[in-house]
Image (spheres, grey):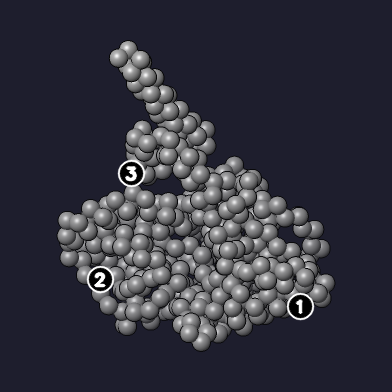
Amino acid sequence: MGAWIEGWFARITLHSLAITVSVLTYILTTRVERERRPPSIAIAWVLGLIAIPYAALPLYLLFGRRKLKRKAAPAVRAHPGSSWAEDLIGSFGLPPAAPSAVRLHRDGGESRLALFETIGRACARLDICTYILRDDILGREVMARMVERAQSGVRVRLLLDGVGALQLSRRGFKRLHAGAVETAVFSPLLARNTSGPRNLRNHRKAVVADDAILWAGGRNFAAEYFDGAPGVPAWLDLSFDLEGAAAAAAAAQFEADWVASGGGPAERLAAARTGAAGGRTQFVPSGPDQSEDTVHALLIDACFHANERLLAVTPYFVPDSSLETALRLAARRGVKIDLCIPASSNHVLADFVRNRALRSLAKAGVAIHLLPYMAHAKAVVFDSTLALCGSVNLDSRSLLINYESAVAFYDLREIDWLAQWIGALIPGAQRFDRRPPGLLRDLGEGLLLTMAYQL
């Protein structure tokens, strides 16, 4: 009997030690790295570390952290910007707004032509960052054009995310290597050493020619993001290209990501063509490498600055409580808010958990429009003063975990173009049904929302 009690006491002591180590690890990493999490997420991690420390601690070390020490050298602002948004972005240490010659792409055909034009205009260096490059009709054409540029003497560098890279076959990688295209994979899933937790994915999408021309937006390099293909319907998406200082800022961000992924640094170009004329734009990266949640903060601040309208389109809408509150309060004080999302996206769980926030916002007066097709576009318009377009979805993963990027537009021409593009989606949409859910669905939404931040 004494031996049994002694063994039982030893197991209790070992379990208590595991709990203590787990909770201390959470506290120390949170304090040292200055992690800020929504209260519900923090509570979920702590309860998991107490209840099942042996499973929760490895999961926390793999997926729980969301900020890294890597940070590009901050830019110094010589004077305040012309708007609150410029000042806020500048306070993050990001380059100021500057004139850019901008073209927004109305559909996949325009986007494809602009993409190939950007690739073709590269004379010294071509940098391409994307989440997905698929070995399909569109992806093979992109690879062929990269190889053509590389064989003509241009240094071509391709950066793929570790998860997205799984969609490119070995044959595709061999084709690129044989054509002198340099490739790097950001945080490969099976790598022993990586720059951070495996849950931090690079979702940025940008093509930069000679540090001066930028093609960007929400499109991955696969057929459905452009015109589709036989048996592959096209998705609705948004992209743009520009020439100006924002392209140089995107090039600097690519360089930081490339070096962090083990790629060789680039030589400094003799002269980058950045003196473009046009509307003012500002490149805004967000993610673990930024000291603040840049786009998230900009969206919340913009909700409180908006006076008349807010239009948004996004494929996935799972906001955290702070963004949801900012949107709800904007609607309650009279801002006309139109949110366009697909009735059914390609992520079933995201469609399920979004409904709690949608019901709350609809009750406050937000008009929610369910599109009868897959929309992968990401853009937000505030009044006639600010618009954002890029790779950022309006969900917690995109805003608080992923490496993302967007461009802020300050000129009325681009702002009105995006407002009209989003507004044209509304007549063909259905309204959201905000009736309260049943008990089981309500419980399911609550449980999944505690994990949605990490999904």
Report the residue marked by disc 3.
Answer: 40
Residue 45: x %, y % from top left: 38, 40
Q: In this view, does 316 lie above or below 373?
A: above
Q: In the image, which disc is placed on residue 432?
A: 2
The residue under the point 48% across, 82% down is 232
Q: What element carries label 1?
A: helix
Q: Residues within 10 Å of mark 2 (few under 14, many from 20)?
A: some
Q: In the image, which disc is placed on residue 148?
A: 1
Residue 422: x %, y % from top left: 40, 76
> Which amino acid, mark 3?
Ser
The residue under the point 43% across, 35% down is 54
| Quarter location, residue 116 | bottom right
Q: What element carries label 3?
A: helix
Q: Is mark 2 on a helix, strand or loop?
A: loop
Q: How crowded is mark 1: few (under 14 residues within 10 Å), some or many (20 or more)?
A: some
Instruction: Please report contact status of discs 2 and 1: CB closer than 8 Å, yes or no.
Output: no
**29 horizontally vs 151: left or right:** left
User: How much space separates mark 1 and mark 3, taking CA atoms?
Assistant: 51 Å
